[in-house]
Each structure stands twice: as structure tokens, then as C-alpha cells.
């Protein structure tokens, strides 16, 4: 979602009577605005300057970029939580109506999987392919083995992520 946002651009109009100033630019009332989400996230000063070989490079999965370093001050913690840092469901008055339901479903599913199963990736290191539209996908799907914890359970323990 960070590298290839589901919504590439956001379209808005200035609704403040008389207009408003943003970053030294005057925007009159009614002016159309276009925000390129991928560009905004990709030029974030926190990781935009990282070299391609760095684990913190924009193209790498690096969850620590959303976690403040040990001993970081309150300003660093707040900078990570700032509004608009992660916007897969949009924002403002056009926020996705299913946002809270989607979050609840993901949390419930993760609870079941994390508490009841051991996970292993069946084919680690599978290269990704970038389709013309959508998110990068593993070239051979994404096979994960789920083994019930504490015995019991059924099935062969293999799951295959959908490629949609």
C-alpha cells in the first residue's frame, strides 16, 4: 500500500472561503487540487534518501519505518503518527465507509492465525512481478504453510493467497 497505493491520486477543491495558503502557495476558493499519493509517500524525508541497497529503502518491506527508535522523543513518535502518513482508505469526508469493518476483520483473522497456527513460507525468496495495475505479486503466488499449534486441526496445512 505504501509502494503502490490502491488510489493513485486524490482530487479535492479548496472549500475555505477566500482561499488558503499551503507551503507558500496561494490557492483560491474553488481551485481544483490533485494529490499524487505515491509521490507524496515516496518523497517522505524519513526514507526518500535511502540508497537502494539499504533495508530502509522505499522499495523494501521495512516495518521499523513506522516505529520510533528506542529512546526517541515525543516529537519523533508524533511524526510517525501524523495525519496522512498512511492513507489506504482515503481520508476526510470521503473516508471509506467500510474502514472500521475492514480493520476489525483483519484484526480478528490475525488473532485466529497468530494464536492458533505456526506459519512458514513455502517458497521464500520468490521474485515479485509488477502487473500493469495493482500490487506486486509473487511470480508463483504466495504459499504459506499453517500448522495448528498444540496438535489437532485438519487439512493439509497449505494455504495459497489469492491473486486478485
Image (cartoon, grey):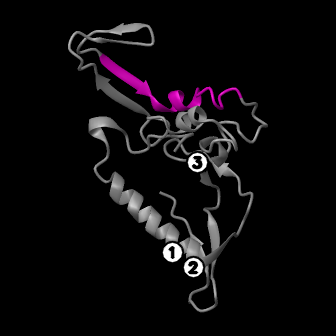
In front: label 3 or label 1 = 1
Q: Depth check: 48 or 135 in front?
A: 48
At which x and y percent is residue 83?
A: 44, 35
Q: Do the residues bearing badges 2 and 1 touch, measured as CB atoms within 8 Å?
A: yes
Label of residue 136 in the image: 3
SS label for mark 2:
helix
What's drawn in magenta, residue-wise?
Answer: 32-49
Label of residue 116 in the image: 2
Q: Marks 2 and 3, how far apart in space?
A: 29 Å
Residue at image x 23%, y 15%?
Answer: 30
Q: Marks 3 and 1, how far apart in space?
A: 26 Å
At which x and y percent is residue 102?
A: 38, 58
Dot 3 crowding, Cα within 10 Å, few <14, some 14–19, many 20+ = some
Label of residue 112 in the image: 1
User: For residue 114, which quarter of the picture?
Assistant: bottom right
Residue 1 falls within the magenta-colored stretch: no
User: For residue 121, which quarter of the picture?
Assistant: bottom right
N-terminal-most mark, 3 or 1 = 1
Amino acid at each position: 500500500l505504501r509502494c503502490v497505493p490502491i488510489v493513485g491520486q486524490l482530487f479535492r477543491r479548496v472549500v475555505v472561503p477566500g482561499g488558503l495558503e499551503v507551503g507558500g502557495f496561494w490557492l483560491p476558493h474553488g481551485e481544483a487540487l490533485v494529490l499524487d499519493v505515491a509521490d507524496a509517500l515516496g518523497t517522505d524525508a524519513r526514507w526518500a534518501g535511502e540508497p537502494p541497497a539499504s533495508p530502509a529503502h522505499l522499495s523494501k518491506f521495512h516495518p521499523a519505518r513506522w516505529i520510533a527508535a528506542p529512546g526517541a522523543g515525543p516529537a519523533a513518535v508524533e511524526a510517525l503518527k501524523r495525519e496522512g502518513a498512511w492513507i489506504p482508505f482515503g481520508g476526510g469526508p470521503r473516508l471509506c465507509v467500510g474502514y472500521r469493518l475492514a480493520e476489525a476483520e483483519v484484526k480478528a483473522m490475525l488473532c485466529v492465525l497468530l494464536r492458533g497456527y505456526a506459519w512458514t513460507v513455502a517458497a521464500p525468496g520468490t521474485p515479485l512481478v509488477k502487473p500493469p495495475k495493482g500490487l506486486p505479486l509473487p511470480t508463483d503466488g504466495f504459499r504459506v504453510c499453517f500448522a495448528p499449534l498444540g496438535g489437532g486441526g485438519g487439512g493439509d496445512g497449505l494455504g495459497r493467497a489469492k491473486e486478485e
